[in-house]
Image: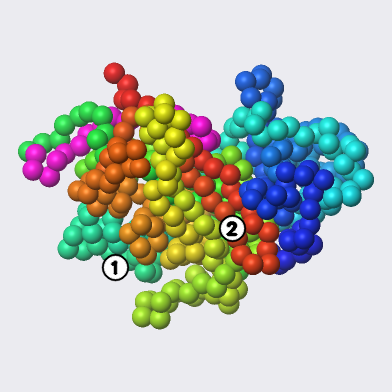
Amino acid sequence: MTTLNETHDSTLTSWVTSANDGVTDFPIQNLPFASFRHKGSNESFRGGVAIGDQILDLAAARTSGLFDGLVAEALNAAAQPTLNHFMGMGKTAWSSLRLALSRALRSGSEAEETLKDCLIAQSRAEYSLPCSIGDYTDFYTSVYHATSVGSLFRPDNPLLPNYKWVPIGYHGRASSIGVSGQTFHRPKGQTKAPDAAQPSFGPCKRLDYELEIGIFMGTGNSLGDPVSIDEADDHVFGICLFNDWSARDIQAWEYQPLGPFLSKNFASTISPWLVTMEALAPYRTAFSHPAEDPQPLPYLSSDANSQQGALDIQLECLLQTEQMRIEGQEPTRLSQSSFKHSYWTIGQMVAHHTVNGCNLQPGDLLGSGTQSGPAHEEAGSLLELSAGGKQPFTLPNGETRTFLEDGDAVVMRGHCTKPGAARIGFGEVVGTVLPARR
Ligand code: CA
């Protein structure tokens, strides 16, 4: 796992002054990667690094002559329209580029004179997916979410017996994953009310979001060659916010016996910035299962995983209805949670995914599963917040919701903070529901 180094020093400041205000998601200790271009332009997308309210254009920076050796090679890869090649270069290359950029962007750096011409305001940028996502797997790592959803779908048997032994997941679909700003039409499908004699077809009536983090693989593994728990974190490139839109009525009818299908593959939205595992190093925390629970099997267990396998990432979900947008009201918060509640660590997800020899590849995406905390108001989905649609809740402007309505925009944000470390954030992911197609 990544140890702390000079790039994490909380006293570092940047000559990009907006990085130094203490509230930005992107201080010099963060340095996340995205693929961007000028908004509304026909330019090629290329790699960029966030610093304050600016983007360092890596395609411009690589022509500066400031960098050489492995750093120049990594910079060249990170400047491409997709980050896959850079993600596959591995930890030494990622870390070398991070250190070089940290030094170049620091207050007093001689690189300021050259790199100040390589900045673009984030307000003037648009983003694409940061990489080509070959495969996408969604896990189910919040025991609180699994228990409360299980109790709605199976009141007599909420948490299935495998849950505390196996990091449960399913193979999702990558083609419908979009970047923040994504809009999609309300899906149509088959649903069946419990008391109906047969299913009917029509627009989803129980459209939901899921508050998740997205875990992007860096270096892959060869087919047949498992990644051990102690190697697992070194294969992970970084993390974004992830909204796994879900059609609950379609899901309830289709999910047995093979799991979710059309209820999940119509859209999923990620935040544009990938916060690297190295940037997240100060926020690692101890991991354990409760003493009364089964302890992880040896292939899912290691001293390092127990000592610092978990990550404390604060998450929040907000809603802006169409009416709120028309009236100029800011999104209202629906819930807050933390990834520290996850029942399985990222290392365990990777070790489990590959233990049978399955090969992961650079740019593969692992969803964490909905991150609900122990309290009701920490729920990461409307299914939980509205108790399966039985308890509507009222928004500050008087509107009520059980599930999402047409025109609703869901906003997710995340950040890490603790004494002695710089606060770093993930930016946000926004997605908007359009009416079903006629
Ligand atoms: Ca999910």
Residue 294 location, quadrant: bottom left
Is residue 50 among what the camera can see?
yes
Determine which residue is flagged by label 1: 161
Give the residue drawn at x 28%, y 64%.
Answer: 159
Task: Indicate the amino acid at tag 2.
Answer: Cys
Q: Foreground residue, 14 or 342? A: 14
Check residue 118 for magenta coloring.
Answer: no
Upstream in sequence: badge 1 or badge 2: 1
Image check: 386 left or right of 121?
Answer: left
Residue 194 point in image, percent of width and height = 12, 45
Q: Foreground residue, 175 or 387? A: 387
Image check: 46 left or right of 338?
Answer: right
Q: Give the class, few, some or many, for how many residues have Cα within 10 Å of label 2's Cα (few <14, many ≥20).
A: many
Give the residue drawn at x 73%, y 50%.
Answer: 20
Dots 1, 2 in contact, CB < 8 A: no
Residue 58 point in image, percent of width and height = 77, 37
Q: Is mark 1 within 8 Å of ligand 1?
A: no
Residue reaching furthest to the bottom: 291
Task: Point out the image quarter for the N terminus.
Answer: bottom right
Q: Foreground residue, 127 or 166? A: 127
Residue 15 location, quadrant: top right
Check residue 176 for magenta coloring.
Answer: yes
Region in magenta: 173-196
Give the residue drawn at x 73%, y 61%.
Answer: 10
Q: Give the class, few, some or many, for how many residues have Cα within 10 Å of label 1's Cα (few <14, many ≥20).
A: few
Is residue 247 among what the camera can see?
no
Task: Indicate the amino acid at tag 1.
Answer: Pro
Residue 77 point in image, percent of width and height = 75, 40
